Image (cartoon, rainbow, N blue to C red):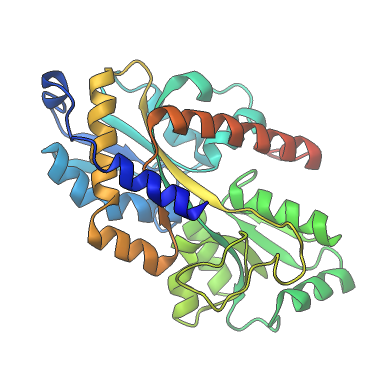
Amino acid sequence: MSIQRRALLGATASLPVAGSARAQSFPTQPLRIIPPYPPGGGTDTVARLLLPHLMSQLGQNIVIENRGGAGGSIGAAEVARAPKDGHTLLLDSMGHVVNPTLMTGLPFDYASAFAPITQLTWQPQMLVVAASSPHRTTADLVAAAKARPGTVSYASSGNGTGAHLAMVEFTRLTGVEMTHIPYRGGGPAMTDLVAGNVTCAFASAAAATAHVQGGRLRALGAAGLRRISALPDVTTLDEQGYRGFDFDEWNGLWTVAGSPAAAVMRLHAAAVFALNQPDVRARMDQIGIVPLGSTPEDFATFVIAQRDRAARLIRLANITLG
């Protein structure tokens, strides 16, 4: 899978930055990138890594505006009501496919309000505890949860987020009961986890790798079927005997539906260019992120499949916002 993804990235990297004179005329003003989560999480990290190269390719200033809250729907709503000109971008993650099932009464439709540009990254997750935690292994954590049901707590970046769904899947697989502590984003969740205020969490490599390498967190296992490149000694949960466990995250880029196709083309090529820059690739490798760069069509297909998977898990576990 990783080889295929990297091949796709290399193939799309050959696309010209502008496919037509019309594409060359875009953008005509500064752009906004809205990560719908607070600073400090994996989505925000990706936005800031790509920012300088996107600006150099698009020839305009770009401002990152973090609009956290309500599982990412506040920031998404800001993009949905922006002008249909390609100058406002949404850099989202799992919330994009979770919210359509989890939330009702939204002022926009996730399925129709946004034009897909590209899947930017594949973000491995890992199960982590504070460095001060007595739990040295995943087995230790599971044993503690079984011995004292409900007393082991876990953080997430919000109800129904990737970190939450990963733990729902893990507790179902292991038959344990843990207490969920939702936060307003990955950054605040990491802060409390490092401080030892919650027991554990599934966290993206982008958000947690530096803390693990710096000795502030302990990684108990990788959540995907492949080890994290930045932490090759951390075995996968599947390798540890939790067979079939596979729950990584990702990031994608959208603009407002109805924006000119030429603008989407230009944004896609600029994003692929940024993902292929040596400094971006090196930094992503350091923190365990896999750069992608899929076509808008492939990304649209991927999002539909992810939305269906999330809906099944939410209904199976009866997850609500309460």
Q: Is residue 203 above or below residue 72?
A: below
Could you tell whether 147 is left or right of 278 in the image? right
Q: Does residue 249 appear in the picture of this structure?
A: yes
Could you tell whether 18 is left or right of 2 in the image? left
Residue 214, x across and y down, in percent: 44, 80
Could you tell whether 262 is left or right of 102 in the image? left
Q: Quadrant of residue 237?
A: bottom right
Query: The C terminus appears in which quarter of the rendering?
Result: top right
Q: Quadrant of residue 134?
A: bottom right
Q: Does residue 107 appear in the picture of this structure?
A: no
Q: Is residue 125 above or below residue 320?
A: below
Residue 244, x across and y down, in percent: 73, 57
Residue 195, x across and y down, in percent: 55, 74
- The one of 135 and 237 positioned closer to us in this rendering: 237
Residue located at (87% from left, 69% from top):
146
Q: Quadrant of residue 89?
A: top left
- The one of 167 and 262 positioned closer to us in this rendering: 262
- The one of 71 and 14 positioned closer to us in this rendering: 14
Q: Residue extending furthest right?
A: 147
Could you tell whether 30 is left or right of 232 in the image? left
How many tags in the picture?
0
- The one of 51 and 308 positioned closer to us in this rendering: 308
Residue located at (32% from left, 23% from top):
82
Residue 124, x across and y down, in percent: 53, 58
Residue located at (39% from left, 29% from top):
296
